[in-house]
Image (tube, coloured by chain):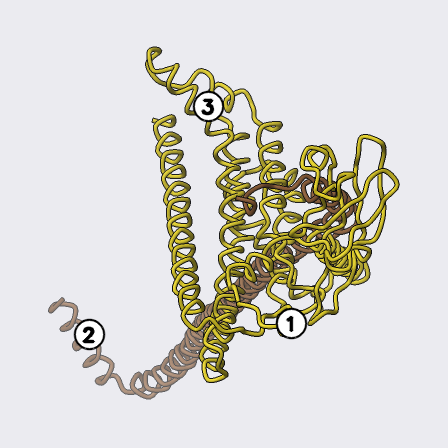
Chain colours: A yellow, B brown
């Protein structure tokens, strides 16, 4: 009877997880489709007019240049070796390369926006579509040599992440300070704004999903929650130090999901492993079930990774597409419409920023809960 | 495709900085914050419990007071009742005693009166008898002076004797 209840609750959990997964994936596929369909007629429209449009990168200075929204948007959501402010103003960022001969440090300013090559200590480098490539002796890009060079540069996303981390540290260490100063008193100021969120993570995410062992996982859950949330919010700020698509970058979500996977599997108890390798099914189903369960170990964090990445990237793409409309139609008349839509999307993204942080943390807590659950 | 290919640099920096963030926050933020929240919740719980206890204690005391009051009142009533019965008893006793005493006195008086009466009567009888004797003596003396009259008397007396 007891086992049955546990099974039912587990099945429910799995159903919820999968519905959420499917729902979110389907939504995101839709938005991608919308973004794409928005982009496609744009290209044809541009082709029809076949006229130069001033792009955000100050395309006017480069003469009559076709406005390519896909390129602009992809440039914005991708990582970069420079932090672009406005027009031709951008902040050069440090480049760190690992080559077979040793490390290389130099400023990305030496590339002059990709117009010049830089001769480093070991190789000559060129910036091609924001990727650092090795230039061979013949003056062309040496793809084989480029593959051996690993790029550990402080890119725009890394820098933006550092800003977010600095902000989080400042905020929470100061809040912790006010807890120390005001022992036993009611929270005040920033403390009273953040306390409900911390308590929310504890009481509504950790406790119901993990159970009485929740305390051990609180630091991890709180850290991923606020890390994702702060990065999401900073990504919505269009000016420095925001504007980077940090949480919409697959590398970052990959690391977060990897963290969750490690936490879950390191803390998995014997019931968790038994459930995977000796599932409660007829023995002839074992080959199938074991494969499914082992795939589940990977697929759960994989879904986390894709969900966060897709949600945030999609939001950025939509906002940028709406802004691009002004340049596609080459008229200011469309600007109010774009701005209105962008405003709506930004407000929606505010919600999504919180929601994605919440879902990531909730599912992490759920997976941890499944791994540490005791069966009697 | 480039969009979904994690770049090694970003993975590396994210990993390093996330672990640093986790360690720093864990030590300098989450521990004190969660500890403080936990402590405060506990102190609030304790305070509430104490308040509840105080309330119960208060109710208990009030009930006790009520009890004491009632007891005191009952005792007072008891005492009053006792006093009343005592008073009534004493009064009745006194009355009874007075009655008994009175009746005794009356009896005594009656006896006294009777005695006096008897004495008086005896005296009266004595006097009457001596008086009558005296009278009779005088009558007889006067009567017996006359012979006929003596005879007549004797005859009369004899007549009485015969009748008896």
Direction from residue A124 to residue A314 in the image, left or right: left
| Residue A344 rendering spot, x and y as whole percentages | 47, 72
Residue lying at the far top in this picture: please name it: A283
Q: Nearer the viewer, mark 2 or mark 3?
A: 3
Q: Secondary structure at mark 3?
A: loop
Q: Residues within 10 Å of mark 2 (few under 14, many from 20)?
A: few
Q: Residues within 10 Å of mark 1 (few under 14, many from 20)?
A: few
The C terminus of chain B sits in image quarter: bottom left
Q: CA distance from mark 2 to mark 3?
A: 148 Å
Q: CA distance from mark 1 to mark 3?
A: 67 Å
- Front residue of B105/B9: it is B9
Residue at which label 2 appears: B157
Q: Secondary structure at mark 1?
A: loop
> In the figure, A167 relative to A45: above or below?
above
Determine contact: label 2, label 3, CB under 8 Å. Answer: no
* Chain for numbered disc 1: A
Residue at which label 1 appears: A58
- Identify the residue at horizontal 40%, vertical 60% (top origin): A40
| Residue A9 rendering spot, x and y as whole percentages | 38, 36
* Chain for numbered disc 3: A
Q: Nearer the viewer, mark 1 or mark 2?
A: 1
| Residue A112 rendering spot, x and y as whole percentages | 77, 59
Q: Which mark is residue A376?
A: 3
Q: Which mark is residue A253?
A: none
């Amino acid at each position: 009877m007891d086992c049955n209840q546990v099974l039912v609750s587990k099945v429910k959990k799995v159903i919820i997880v999968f519905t959420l997964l499917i729902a979110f994936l389907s939504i995101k596929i839709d938005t991608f489709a919308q973004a794409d369909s928005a982009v496609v007629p744009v290209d044809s429209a541009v082709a029809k007019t076949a006229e130069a449009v001033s792009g955000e990168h100050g395309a006017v200075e480069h003469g009559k240049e076709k406005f390519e929204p896909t390129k602009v948007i992809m440039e914005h959501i991708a990582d970069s070796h420079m932090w672009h402010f406005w027009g031709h103003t951008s902040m050069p960022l440090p480049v760190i390369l690992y080559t077979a001969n040793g490390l290389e440090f130099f400023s990305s300013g030496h590339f002059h926006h990709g117009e010049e090559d830089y001769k480093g200590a070991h190789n000559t480098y060129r910036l091609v579509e924001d990727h650092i490539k090795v230039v061979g002796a013949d003056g062309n890009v040496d793809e084989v040599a480029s593959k051996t060079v690993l790029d550990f540069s402080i890119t725009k996303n890394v820098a933006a992440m550092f800003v977010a981390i600095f902000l989080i540290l400042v905020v929470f260490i100061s809040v912790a300070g006010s807890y120390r100063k005001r022992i036993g008193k009611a929270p005040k100021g920033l403390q009273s704004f953040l306390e409900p969120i911390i308590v929310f993570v504890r009481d509504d995410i950790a406790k119901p999903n993990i159970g009485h062992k929740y305390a051990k996982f609180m630091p991890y859950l709180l850290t991923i929650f606020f890390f994702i949330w702060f990065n999401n919010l900073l990504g919505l700020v269009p000016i420095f130090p925001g504007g980077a698509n940090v949480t919409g970058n697959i590398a970052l979500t990959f690391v977060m999901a990897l963290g969750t996977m490690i936490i879950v599997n390191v803390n998995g108890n014997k019931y968790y492993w038994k459930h995977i390798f000796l599932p409660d099914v007829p023995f002839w189903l074992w080959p199938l079930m074991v494969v499914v369960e082992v795939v589940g170990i990977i697929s759960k964090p994989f879904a986390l990774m894709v969900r966060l990445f897709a949600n945030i990237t999609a939001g950025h793409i939509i906002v940028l597409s709406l802004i691009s409309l002004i340049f596609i139609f080459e008229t200011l008349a469309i600007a109010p419409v774009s701005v209105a839509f962008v405003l709506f999307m930004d407000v929606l993204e505010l919600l999504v920023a919180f929601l994605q942080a919440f879902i990531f943390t909730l599912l992490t807590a759920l997976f941890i809960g499944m791994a540490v659950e005791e069966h009697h | 495709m480039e969009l979904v290919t994690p770049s090694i640099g970003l993975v590396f920096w994210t990993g390093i900085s996330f672990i640093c963030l986790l360690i720093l926050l864990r030590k300098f933020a989450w521990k004190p914050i969660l500890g403080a929240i936990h402590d405060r919740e506990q102190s609030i719980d304790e305070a509430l419990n104490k308040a509840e206890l105080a309330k119960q204690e208060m109710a208990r005391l009030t009930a006790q007071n009520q009890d004491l009051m009632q007891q005191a009142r009952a005792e007072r009533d008891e005492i009053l009742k006792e006093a009343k019965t005592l008073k009534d008893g004493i009064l009745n006793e006194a009355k009874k005693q007075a009655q008994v005493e009175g009746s005794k006195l009356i009896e005594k008086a009656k006896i006294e009166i009777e005695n006096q009466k008897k004495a008086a009567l005896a005296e009266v009888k004595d006097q009457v008898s001596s008086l009558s004797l005296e009278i009779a003596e005088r009558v007889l003396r006067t009567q017996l002076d006359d012979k006929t009259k003596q005879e007549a008397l004797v005859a009369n007396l004899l007549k009485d004797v015969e009748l008896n």
